[in-house]
Amino acid sequence: MSSLRPRAPTRPRVNRIVVRRFQADDSIKELTALLHRAYRGLAARGLNFTASYQDEALTAARMRDGICLIGIIEKRIIATATIYQRRTSLARWYSREGLASFGQFAVDPAYQRRNIGTRLLQIVEKRAKRLGCRELALDTAKAA
């Protein structure tokens, strides 16, 4: 007699991920949809992150203020982070010399828990060092 257990849902395979800067021919619509998917769970918990509801125009505006990196698997954007240097729109602390911050940090829920976010963060750290920054900050809610 065999015991049948339900199969766990299959997750997409992570083949080779390419992380690069967002380019003019990349899709802002696709990037915005990724942000909405990735932040949906936080919004459901009552956390108010702009990335959970921003439109394509705001996604583009937030990208223009920094360096937007994207992670791509099989021609699909599955991760992103935007690095900012000396932001003036947030608290004064973010405009300090030698400080970079990052935001719009997201990994598609279908690809989470596979070290993609960790790898993307390492790339963000290296990029901030190349910009001459000694500190890196992430503005987020404690509950996130």
Image (cartoon, helix red, strand yellow):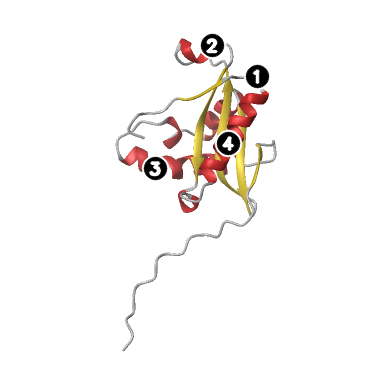
How far apart are the two marked residues, 2 and 1, measured between alpha carbons?
A: 12 Å
x and y percentages locating residue 76 in the rendered image: 60, 50
Q: Which one is earlier in the sequence, the residue at label 1 or at label 3?
A: 3
Q: Work out whether residue 120 or residue 49 is closer to the camera in this orientation and state it.
A: 120
Give the residue at x 66% y 22%. Answer: 131
> Could you tell me which quadrant the N terminus lies in?
bottom left
Indicate which disc residue 122 carries: 4
Indicate which disc residue 50 carries: none
Label 4 close to label 3 by CB (< 8 Å): no
Indicate which disc residue 96 carries: 2
Q: Which one is earlier in the sequence, the residue at label 4 or at label 1?
A: 4
Label 3 close to label 2 by CB (< 8 Å): no
Q: Is residue 28 above or below residue 65?
A: below
Q: Amino acid at mark 3?
A: Arg
How far apart are the two marked residues, 4 and 2, measured between alpha carbons?
A: 22 Å
Q: Which one is earlier in the sequence, the residue at label 2 or at label 1?
A: 2
Q: Amino acid at mark 1?
A: Gly
Q: Is residue 1 above or below residue 10?
A: below
How far apart are the two marked residues, 4 and 1, measured between alpha carbons?
A: 16 Å
Of marks 2 and 1, the one in the foreground: 1
Q: Amino acid at mark 2?
A: Arg
For mark 2, give the secondary structure: loop
How far apart are the two marked residues, 1 and 3, measured between alpha carbons?
A: 34 Å
Residue behind mark 3: 40
How far apart are the two marked residues, 3 and 2, measured between alpha carbons?
A: 32 Å
For mark 4, give the secondary structure: helix
Q: Which one is earlier in the sequence, the residue at label 4 or at label 2?
A: 2
Residue behind mark 1: 132
Q: Amino acid at mark 4?
A: Gln
How far apart are the two marked residues, 4 and 3, measured between alpha carbons?
A: 24 Å
x and y percentages locating residue 19 in the rendered image: 64, 42
